[in-house]
Amino acid sequence: MSHFYAMISRMKYIDRWGLMNNTKTENISEHSLEVAILAHALVSIANTRCGCDLNADRAAVIGLFHDASEIITGDMPTPVKYYNPEIKNAYKKVEKVAEDKLIGMLDEDLRDLYRPLIRDVDPALAPYIKAADKLSALIKCIEEVRMGNNEFLKAKAATEEAIDAMDLQALKIFKEEYLPSYYLTLDELG
């Protein structure tokens, strides 16, 4: 009996932004879907506008699994995770153990298919997954601030700074052309 898929389904029970007062909770299942969509968008932009030849579908699937280890570890708040190099390195080790534990739940004939989705991500796609993850965090901050939740102002500024520091042309294009829509109401989008 393999428990992998049952464990993956538990992403919906792991809330993000645990140290923050949220107007709407977000779990890693919701976050992972958004990261998948954004990763696909970024790679599609890179392919069509920047001359890249990357697999957008693969990026989307990696996005779905990018936080799977948090089923075991929980969502470590960013200020804690990056508090100092020792904690950051220790958490990376814990993440790898959790990733191996999840992969180990698969039947042997499926492990090699899932390992590059969970642990050994294609280095050409990794920057797009990271950018999509940051974009998703920024979108959450935008939504919270739009709802009057000033608790997210500093997180928003820090996330914008992190995004601006990324050297990814597709991300710059997304930020300029698509991100402004996230500030609009439904009526304004229509």
Image (cartoon, rainbow, N blue to C red):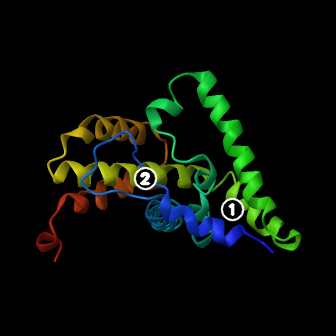
Residue drawn at x 44%, y 59% as measured from the top left? 27
Q: Say above or below: 139 vs 188.
A: above
Q: Amino acid at mark 2?
A: Leu
In the picture as drawn, the residue positioned furthest to the right comes out as 108
Residue drawn at x 26%, y 41% as measured from the top left? 152
Disc 1 element: helix
Disc 2 element: helix
Q: Residues within 10 Å of mark 1 (few under 14, many from 20)?
A: many
Quarter-of-image position of residue 105: bottom right
**Quadrant including the C terminus:** bottom left
Q: Amino acid at mark 1?
A: Leu
Q: Say above or below: 26 vs 5.
A: above
**Quadrant including the N terminus:** bottom right
Question: In x, y percent, where is residue 48?
Answer: 49, 68
Which residue corresponds to mark 1?
A: 117
How far apart in space, not on screen, are marks 1 and 2 (Cα)? 21 Å
In the picture as drawn, the residue positioned furthest to the front comes out as 1
Identify which residue, 30 or 184, lies in the foreground: 30
In the picture as drawn, the residue positioned furthest to the bottom comes out as 190
Which residue corresponds to mark 2?
A: 171
